[in-house]
Image (cartoon, rainbow, N blue to C red):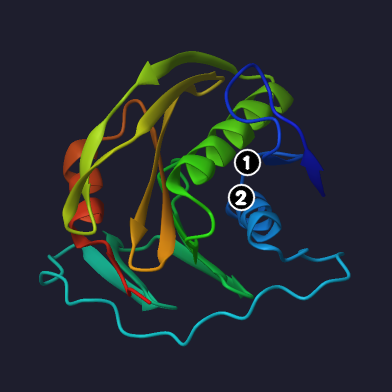
Amino acid sequence: MVQGGGSGGLGANTLPVVSGPVTRRGIFLALLVLVGGCGDDGAETAAPRPATRAAPAAPPTPEGFARFEDHGIGFDHPAGMEVETEVEGAVASAAATRADGLRFIVFTSPDVVSPEEAMALQRNNVAVAAVQRGERIVEDNQSPSRTLAGAEREGRRFVFETPDGPMHAELFAFVAGEQTVTVVMQFPDELAGREALLDRFGRSLRVAER
C-alpha cells in the first residue's frame, strides 16, 4: 500500500511513503506514483517504458564477482548474491541481496522524477521503515561521495541501531540521459572489506541512457 505523507522533516510531505519495511518493492511503487502509474491496485496504466538499450561497457569483472546485466542496468556484485528484478511501465529495478545484510539496489525512472524527489522519497521510506521495525537512526547527517556510473556522486548516509548491530544505508540519485537513477547501498557495520565491495559496485555500475 502506498500512502501520502512524510516524517520528521526527512522529505517533502507530498512524496509517497510505502507502509511496511523499506524494500526494493516499496520504493519501486513510490516511484510509480511519481511518474503517474498506480502500481498493483491502481486503475490507471503506468507510462510505457522506452526501448531498452545496452548499458555502456564496464571494466572486466574480477574474480569472486558476478555481473548483472538486464533492463538497461548493469553492475558487478559478489558472487552468490541473489538478484531480483522488476519492470512496470517506465520504472525498472534490480536488487542484489546477501544474507549478512549487504544489498545493492538500482532503480531507473523517467526524469520527470528529479534526483531531489528521488532522494527525499528514499529518505522518507528509510525513516518510516526504521520506526516500524523498532530501530533507531543514530546518524543521518553524513554525505558520502562515491563513483557511480562513471562520475562522482554525493549522497546521504543513515546508520541504524539494530539488534544485530549498526546497519548503514547510503542513498544516491542522479540523472543519466532522460532518466533518474536511484541507488541504495546497505551494509552491516562489521562487513569485511566493505569499502572494496562498495567501490567495485559503484565503479562497475552502468545505466543505458534513453
Amino acid type, residue under disc 2 in the picture: Ile
Distance of label 1 from label 2 (alpha carbons): 7 Å
Quadrant (top left, top right, bottom left, bottom right) of the C terminus: bottom left
Question: To which quarter of the image does residue 172 belong?
Answer: top left
- Position of 72 compared to 10: left or right? left
Res. 22 mark: 1
Front-most of residues 35 and 26: 35
Front-most of residues 139 and 189: 139
Asked if residue 36 can be seen in this view, the reply is yes
**Residue 68 screen position, x and y as percent:** 34, 72
Camera-nearest label, 1 or 2: 2
Q: Is residue 98 above or below residue 92?
A: above
- Position of 163 compared to 179: left or right? right
- List the residue tagged with mark 2: 27
Q: Secondary structure at mark 1?
A: loop
Q: Residue furthest top?
A: 138
Neighbor class of circle 2 (other Cα within 10 Å; few <14, some 14-19, many 20+) is many
Res. 42 mark: none
Residue located at (58% from left, 73% from top): 90
**Residue 97 screen position, x and y as percent:** 46, 54
Residue located at (63% from left, 36% from top): 125
Mark 1 vs 2, N-terminal side: 1
Question: To which quarter of the image does residue 129 belong?
Answer: top right
Front-most of residues 160 and 99: 160
Q: Is residue 20 above or below residue 28?
A: above
Residue located at (40% from left, 68% from top): 178
Q: CB under 8 Å between callouts 1 and 2?
A: yes
- Position of 52 compared to 25: left or right? left
**Residue 141 screen position, x and y as percent:** 39, 16
Question: To which quarter of the image does residue 69 belong?
Answer: bottom left
Q: Secondary structure at mark 2?
A: helix
**Residue 61 screen position, x and y as percent:** 15, 69
